[in-house]
Image: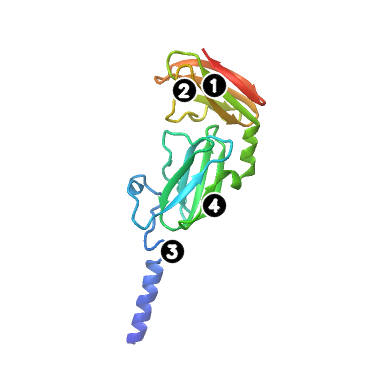
Amino acid sequence: MKKFSWMVLLFFLIVIFPVGCTGGQELPCPISKESMEIPEKDFVAYKLQNDACVTFCDVSIAPSRCNDWGFDWIGNDSWRTGESLTVFLPLGKYDVLLEDCTDLSYNFKKQLVNGENGLQVSDVDANMKDGCQASLTVVNNYDVPICHMWIGADHSDYFGGNWLGEDQIAPGEMSQFFVFPGLYDLKAEDCDFNILRLEIDVLIEDHLTWEVE
């Protein structure tokens, strides 16, 4: 009878309090931004590298068991071609949802986080490389910086996200954005959201220079 009691207790502990590969640390569903501000000591680095010709305005990462994506890991910023993003997570499997600044989504499921690997976006979805075929170079000929650059595609109901994120295009400077070939609505704004230039249904087939003046 005593042996049976210990077996029942052991079964209860395994079922109710499972021990995973995260060393006892399990993130909530959804992950809260506050819980990730100071990573625990057993968290490991997970690097995401954007070598695709796509600018992302939303990056969501959640344990694969979760049904809620939680917060956007880049906030008001954008994640442009050639940039990397490093987050710290417990060991385990995660789903990664990337949304570009035209509202196209890319979902990568059950990505293993073990402290030795990462996610190289261009290797996961070959379609993203099609964005290399066309680009928009924005030239700022105003005497104020461009703080918001909107490049809305025809598949989106609105302009999408701010392609500049927290960056700016200073007076006399320029910035290049890779896009998929197609029609776009273009809008440049200053830091107070005053429109500096607006143009609808601009065809970008290869490499277009767009002067804001």
* Lateral position of residue 188 relative to residue 19, left or right: right
Q: Earlier in the sequence, mark 3 or mark 4?
A: 3
Q: What amino acid does circle 2 point to?
A: Ile
Q: Which residue is mark 3?
A: 21
Q: Nearer the viewer, residue 2 or 98?
A: 98
> Can you tell which of label 1 and label 3 is closer to the viewer?
1
From the viewer's side, name the closer residue of 8 and 195. 195
Looking at the picture, tell me which residue is in the foreground, 202 or 115: 115
Residue drawn at 62 percent across, 34 percent down: 131
What element does badge 3 sit on? loop
Q: Which residue is mark 1?
A: 138
Secondary structure of residue under mark 2: loop
Among numbered discs 1 and 2, the one appearing first in the sequence: 1
Compute the Cα span from label 3 to label 4. Answer: 18 Å
Q: Which mark is residue 109?
A: 4
Which is nearer the N-term, disc 4 or disc 1?
4
State which quadrant residue 136 falls in: top right
Nearest-to-viewer mark from 2 and 3: 2
Residue 8, given in percent of the width and then of the height, sits at 37, 78
Residue at 56 percent across and 44 percent down: it is 121
Mark 1 and mark 2 in contact? Answer it, CB < 8 Å.
yes
Q: Amino acid at mark 1?
A: Val
Q: Secondary structure at mark 1?
A: strand
Find residue 105 and report its image quarter. top right
Q: How is the image coloured?
A: rainbow
User: Which comes sooner in the sequence, label 2 or label 3?
Assistant: 3
Mark-to-mark CA distance, 2 and 3: 45 Å
**How much space separates mark 1 and mark 2, taking CA atoms?**
8 Å
Extreme bottom residue here?
A: 1
Please name the amino acid that badge 4 sits on: Lys
- Indicate which label's residue lies in the foreground, 3 or 4: 3
